[in-house]
Amino acid sequence: MTDLLRVLPHFAVGQYASLLPVLEKHALTTSDLLTLDPVDIGKRTHLPLLDLKRLCATVLNALHTDLGVLGPSGQPGQGQDQDQDQEQEQEQEQEQEPLRHVGHLGRPPPAPAAAAPSSVVLKQTAASLAAQWQTISTLDATLDSALGGGIPAGYVTEITGESGAGKTQFLLTLLLAVQLPPPHGLGRPALYISTEAALSTRRLSQVLAAHPLLRSVEPPAGRPSLDNIVSTATPDLESQDHILTFQVPVEIERRNIGLLVLDSVAANFRAEFERSSSTHQQHGSNMGARSTELVRLGMQLRDLARKYNLAVVVANQVADRFGGGSKTPISSFRHQGQSQPPQHHLHHQFAGAGSSTQESPLATRSKRYMPGGAGPAIPAVEPSSSLADIVPRSSITEPRPPSTMLPPPPPYPYGDDDGSGAPAPPALLLDHQQRWFTGWGDDLDDQAALKTPSLGLVWSTQIAARIALYKRPAYGNRLRHHSRQRLDGSGDDEDKEDDRSRLGMPALHTWRRWMKVVFAPHAPASAPGLDGAVEFQVTMAGVKAVAKE
């Protein structure tokens, strides 16, 4: 039971010391104890059946206690334990006295009356959970409204985006906002763990001095301060695991931490596991070990958030997404007078549908045998023109090369109602599904470069909410103040104005930024593209939403 103490750290393993080594030898996990039949587990491990049932019941009872499920008498799972004990006694009697199963007439006796199911009382109701709901504000009403009130306590929230999108600005604002009393904050200190650069105290001082809400709070009422922010650095994955396992819980209990920030979650994993390997087998083993460490990190952060009712916010990097089919929208073919995309375009898109950098090696190998795959084609060898008369030809019809024997791709039966025949990607392909959990690619008509949050699908299953930040360049005209004089010195003022307008070149004016909720349990997801996203700007006072005209 390698994961029993991870799932239930306070589980009493002393009375089951004889069972756990055998279960660990057969690679049985806590999930197996809850989902498999004890009889099947007993056949695999050759352990006593009653001891296995007792262990499964105890693990289930411990999980109910951890979740707060109470029995009718107010004790965790007491009614269910009584029912299980009665069933175990009945099965034990049946095993010891098999002759009682048959009566005098050779018929089985009537089954005993089943015990009435005990009512289960929840330790916390929906009303009590709603009363305990706490969030950390972004200090902007529009951004808080899009986030469902702010960053929730008790959950793991990820803020992802490319460099310069505003991730650090959001984190610095949250470090100060958590110190405010409700409803803007939790009135508790913050803990900042950095894996790349140190905490920018200068920028924190700017936000603290420039934001009107932070300045209006009087010191006796709990004005935010840099003294209430604890920071540390983790240069590698080993030190990060040690700090999160041993030092962070002690610091949370000592200082009553309300916000835990990890900036960023992908830096140490990239340095540790994404190194170049000589063989594909080593690369696969690295990815397997990385997935295990990601699941372990997610479990650690979720346990901290739930146990201490604090908000855990992690920053994540993004990478450029290559492949995944053509980005040309189907509407472009309609503008060109074609009711259906050309077959060569569909063929290319079908062949490139699995060419993403996140695909498995099996998918890469299987494409060699697909129509239009990337496998090497056998060239057709024909005699040159000088040897055409010398080389004898057979009377038997020669088969065509394999490259020409492949049938053309069949027309796609999918498409819009107008019969455009737009190809539908396979439903189980990652390129098709990642548009709903990465934050990029949900708008098919958007021609911007696609990004993918780091650490892949495994890490996406470990977080409760994902917030994506976007940035787009805004260009303006650069005008020269001195117009170019003609060679002969002639020309009036109108000609000079024309020359000045012709000399103007587009130049980067500023960056526009948006915030979008990709998925969250407490807030609805934003609309596809940038339609439902909230535009914001970075100011001296932190992040501020841009008012719509």
Image (spheres, rainbow, N blue to C red):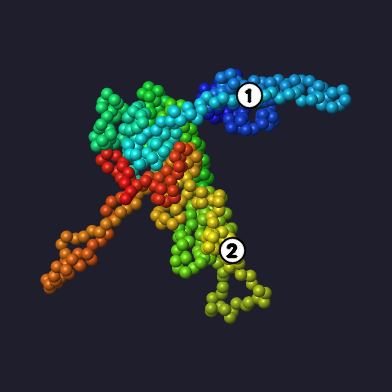
Q: Which percent across, then down, holds residue 318? A: 40, 46
Q: Is residue 328 left or right of residue 175?
A: right
Question: 10 Å neighbourhood of mark 2: few (<14), some, or many (≥20)?
Answer: few
Foreground of the two, 186 or 45: 186
Q: Secondary structure at mark 1?
A: loop
Q: In the displayed orientation, state which residue is furthest to the left.
A: 489
Instruction: Say above or below: 181 vs 458.
Output: above
Picture quadrant of residue 250: top left
Q: Which percent across, then down, holds residue 375? A: 54, 59
- The mark found on residue 410 in the picture is 2
Q: Which percent across, then down, holds residue 170? A: 34, 39
**Pointer 1 or 2: first along the chain:** 1
Would residue 19 be seen by someone viewing this image from the given angle? no
What amino acid is found at the position of numbered circle 1 in the picture?
Ser
Q: Which percent across, then down, holds residue 57? A: 62, 24
What amino acid is found at the position of numbered circle 2 in the picture?
Pro
Instruction: Say above or below: 171 vs 356.
Output: above
Q: Is residue 54 left or right of residue 129?
A: right
Q: Is residue 208 left or right of residue 186?
A: left
Instruction: Say above or below: 180 vs 266.
Output: above
- The mark found on residue 118 in the picture is 1
